[in-house]
Image (cartoon, rainbow, N blue to C red):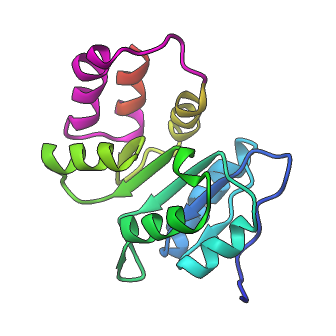
C-alpha cells in the first residue's frame, strides 16, 4: 500500500487527522504540531491505515465528509481493522447543525466531542489537553446522564465554548 501520508512516530504524542480539505488539514496540523503532537493528515482509509503503521494515536480528529464519503463510516472501518483504536478519543469536526438525536448517536458510537466549524484554533490545544487528561474521579452513570451528556448534546459547540463548559 503506497501512501503520501506521514506515519505516526513511536514515543511521541500523536493525533491522526482524517480530513480531505487541504487547507483545513494543514491548519489543524500546524496547531497540533505547535502543541507537541505529530499530526499526519489522511484523506482516505488507505492513507489512515498507512499513517497508523501499527501505532495507535493518542487522539483522532475526523471530518464529517471525507472525499465525498461519510467520515463516520471511514472511522468505523478503521476501528474494525485496527485493534485497540476503539479506546482512542475521537473529535468529530462538522459544519452541519446537529440535532440532539444525532449527538446522542455520536456519543453512543464512541465520539468524545463534536467540534462545530469554524473551529477556534486558539482554544483547540486546551480542549485536547482536557480530552486527554486522566479522569478526576470515577463518573457514575447518573453523573454522566445528568452532567456530561447534556453538554455533549447542546447546540453551538465550538472548541472554545465546549472547553469552557467542560472545565466549569
Residue at 49% x, 75% y is 20
- Residue 85 in the image: x percent, y percent? 58, 54
Q: Is residue 77 left or right of residue 87?
A: left
Residue at 44% x, 18% y is 167
Count of numbered tags: 0
Looking at the image, residue 51 lies above or below residue 159? below
Q: Is residue 115 left or right of residue 38?
A: left
- Residue 46 in the image: x percent, y percent? 60, 81
The magenta region covers 134-161
- Answer whether residue 112 is magenta in the image: no
Q: Quadrant of the C terminus?
A: top left
Q: Nearer the viewer, residue 79 or 6?
A: 79
Residue at 76% x, 43% y is 36
Residue at 82% x, 57% y is 9
- Residue 57 in the image: x percent, y percent? 67, 52
Q: Quadrant of the N terminus?
A: bottom right
Q: Nearer the viewer, residue 140 or 158?
A: 140
Q: Is residue 161 left or right of residue 52?
A: left
Q: Which residue extends farthest top?
A: 137
Q: Quadrant of residue 125?
A: top right
Q: Which residue extends farthest bottom?
A: 2
- Answer whether residue 151 is magenta in the image: yes
- Residue 25 in the image: x percent, y percent? 55, 66
Q: Quadrant of residue 26?
A: bottom right
Looking at the image, residue 1 lies above or below residue 164? below
Q: Nearer the viewer, residue 157 or 75?
A: 75
Amino acid at each position: 500500500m503506497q501512501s503520501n501520508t506521514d506515519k505516526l512516530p513511536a514515543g511521541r504524542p500523536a493525533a491522526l487527522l482524517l480530513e480531505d480539505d487541504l487547507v483545513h488539514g494543514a491548519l489543524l496540523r500546524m496547531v497540533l504540531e505547535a502543541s507537541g503532537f505529530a499530526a499526519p493528515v489522511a484523506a482516505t482509509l488507505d492513507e489512515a491505515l498507512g499513517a497508523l503503521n501499527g501505532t495507535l494515536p493518542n487522539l483522532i480528529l475526523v471530518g464529517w465528509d471525507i472525499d465525498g464519503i461519510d467520515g463516520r463510516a471511514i472511522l468505523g472501518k478503521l476501528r474494525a481493522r485496527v485493534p485497540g483504536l476503539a479506546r482512542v478519543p475521537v473529535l468529530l469536526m462538522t459544519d452541519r447543525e446537529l440535532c440532539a438525536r444525532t449527538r446522542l448517536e455520536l456519543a453512543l458510537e464512541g465520539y468524545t466531542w463534536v467540534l462545530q466549524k469554524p473551529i477556534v484554533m486558539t482554544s483547540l490545544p486546551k480542549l485536547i489537553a482536557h480530552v486527554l487528561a486522566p479522569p478526576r474521579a470515577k463518573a457514575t452513570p447518573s453523573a454522566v446522564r445528568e452532567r456530561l451528556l447534556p453538554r455533549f448534546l447542546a447546540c453551538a459547540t465550538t472548541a472554545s465554548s465546549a472547553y469552557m463548559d467542560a472545565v466549569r
